[in-house]
Amino acid sequence: MDFGPYLVFASLEGAVLAATLSLTALGLSLVFGVMRVVNVAHGEFFMLGAVAAWFVSALGGEALGLPAWAGFAAALVLAPAAVGALAWAADRAILARVGYDPERTIVATIGLLYILQQLTLMGYGPEARPVEPPFNARIALPWPEWGADGFAWTWPWGFGTTSYKLFVIVAAAALLMAVWAVLSRSRFGLIMRATQYDRETAQAFGIPVGKVYAWTFALGAALAAAAAVLIVPIQQAHYLMGGDPLLLSFIVVIIGGLGSLRGTVLAALLIGMSDGVISVFFSPTLAKILATLLVALVLVFRPQGLFGAKTA
Amino acid sequence: MLEVSGLDAGYGKVQVLRGVSLSVGAGEILCVMGRNGAGKTTAMKAIMGLVPPTGGSVKIAGEELVGLPPHEIPRRGLGYVPQGRRLFAELTVAENLDIGLMTRNRGAAVRERMLDMFPRLRDRLRQRAGTLSGGEQQMLAMARALCLEPSVLLMDEPTEGLQPSMIALIREAATAMKAAGVAIVLVEQRADAVLSVADRVTFLDNGRVKETVEAQALRDDPALLHAHVGV
């Protein structure tokens, strides 16, 4: 048995992480890019997405007798929508009131983090609860081999993945494409970008900056929630699960360059894939050490991020 | 068309404008002059609601603008060419124009008129606005403001940093808008650039209006101008 199958297996695990991470980090990056708000509560929106997915699929399964795939599909729509609505309200009730001041919004979102976490603990409890995947067929990974009788496919050791993991990768890629299309092709995307580059001039051209901020904050939170819905059949919903995505999103956003969509996706791929590969071959701790070291190096040598433009 | 009376405004506790009054009618060009720090740009921003006025009134065709949220003010027909152009540099020329068109829901016909007025923009529609030359950027800033089909156009130092041929082009555009019945407020530091097209000149000093005079009087007697702006 050689190195190849391990690498394929590790890359697939990494790709699942990279897929959900790029969605979560993109939400954080959009909010910072457009609003200049460092949203410390971003991980809690991720957690709420997972918890909401559990509620929707449990309710759909028990009360309405829906099959697993229908409950999951409902969760994929309802959980991001609900979390987005909550974020919209949080923007109007908290961030708008402190005038989007950079320091005060950090403190405010730290407060929001604890409020959301404790409310979830009180309402949902300390248990980790699974969501049933809509489909979960095992797929053994084939490996080409040149043996005595020439070329053949083998299935070494039962290395495998599941159809659901492949679906996560495809779904996240589709969502990223959708966000990209909205940002670069739609009217709302144009308004968002104009607000990002020059808030005051945007107002001078009739753009209601307050509304744009609220919708951006909602979109950012909904992206984190969507990533969580995708991951919750693999990971289970827990009220403390927001910590890791927050840390990894910050790592991705710093490496990719704040406010750069392309940079965020590329950095998520880099961090996700390397995390997968290093975790399989060495240890998960080494993966985190290297990622954090990379952040430090980027901050020292290229503070605008690997793919970010220099701020004027 | 635009009536500003007793306008007070400032940043935080620092009051910059003290009871500024000026007015400009349809098809008229009012030039606002003054030294650095006299409050010219602040006056434009206060009219646009970007610096919230603390007192006074701004009326466009009789409608009060003070107290409206800032994004509602341009929709009343105020086009703004900010100092330093303030284009959305990362957006393309076409997207910058789209932002202007969206303000009052104007469509392709207005856009075509702008591109006929500034043909050089037509060749550069897909280009990022930040990569244009200074003169082209100024054209784009004007076209973007004119995409609102404004009844009042505020231009803050549009000739700043431009070569004489470009300044002549800006003057021509201003004259064309005047002929179309737009009320124009032109903020300038350099008298020679625009005095020839102005109808009246308001001198600002230290946040107050010092005097408003007919431009003809200044053209006839250059010494008068020197007395006011000390160039």
Image (cartoon, coloured by chain):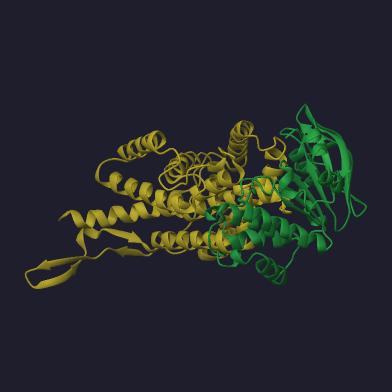
Farthest-out residue, top: B13
Above or below, B8 against B121 in this view is: above
Res A92 → quadrant: top right
Would you identify the image quadrant in which residue A135 lies? bottom left
- Going by the image, does B118 lie left or right of A262? right
Q: Name the residue nearer the viewer: A198 or A120.
A: A198
Q: Position of residue B55 (x, y in %)?
A: 88, 36
* Residue nearest the observer in this picture, A171 or B143: B143
Left/right placement of residue A269 relative to residue A174 reads left
What residue is shown at x 20% (from left), y 60% (from top)?
A156
Side of B85 relative to A291 (left or right): right
Residue B20 visible somewhere in the drawing: no
Q: Which chain is yellow?
A: A
| Residue at the spot 77% in from the left edge and 26% down from the top edge | B13
Compared with A161, A48 (above or below) is above
Q: From where the camera sits, is residue A51 visible?
A: yes
Furthest residue to the left? A148
The one nearer the camera, B20 or A53, is: B20
Q: Position of residue A174 (x, y in %)?
A: 48, 63
Q: Is residue A119 left or right of residue B6?
A: left
Chain assigned green: B
x, y (%) of residue A11?
31, 54
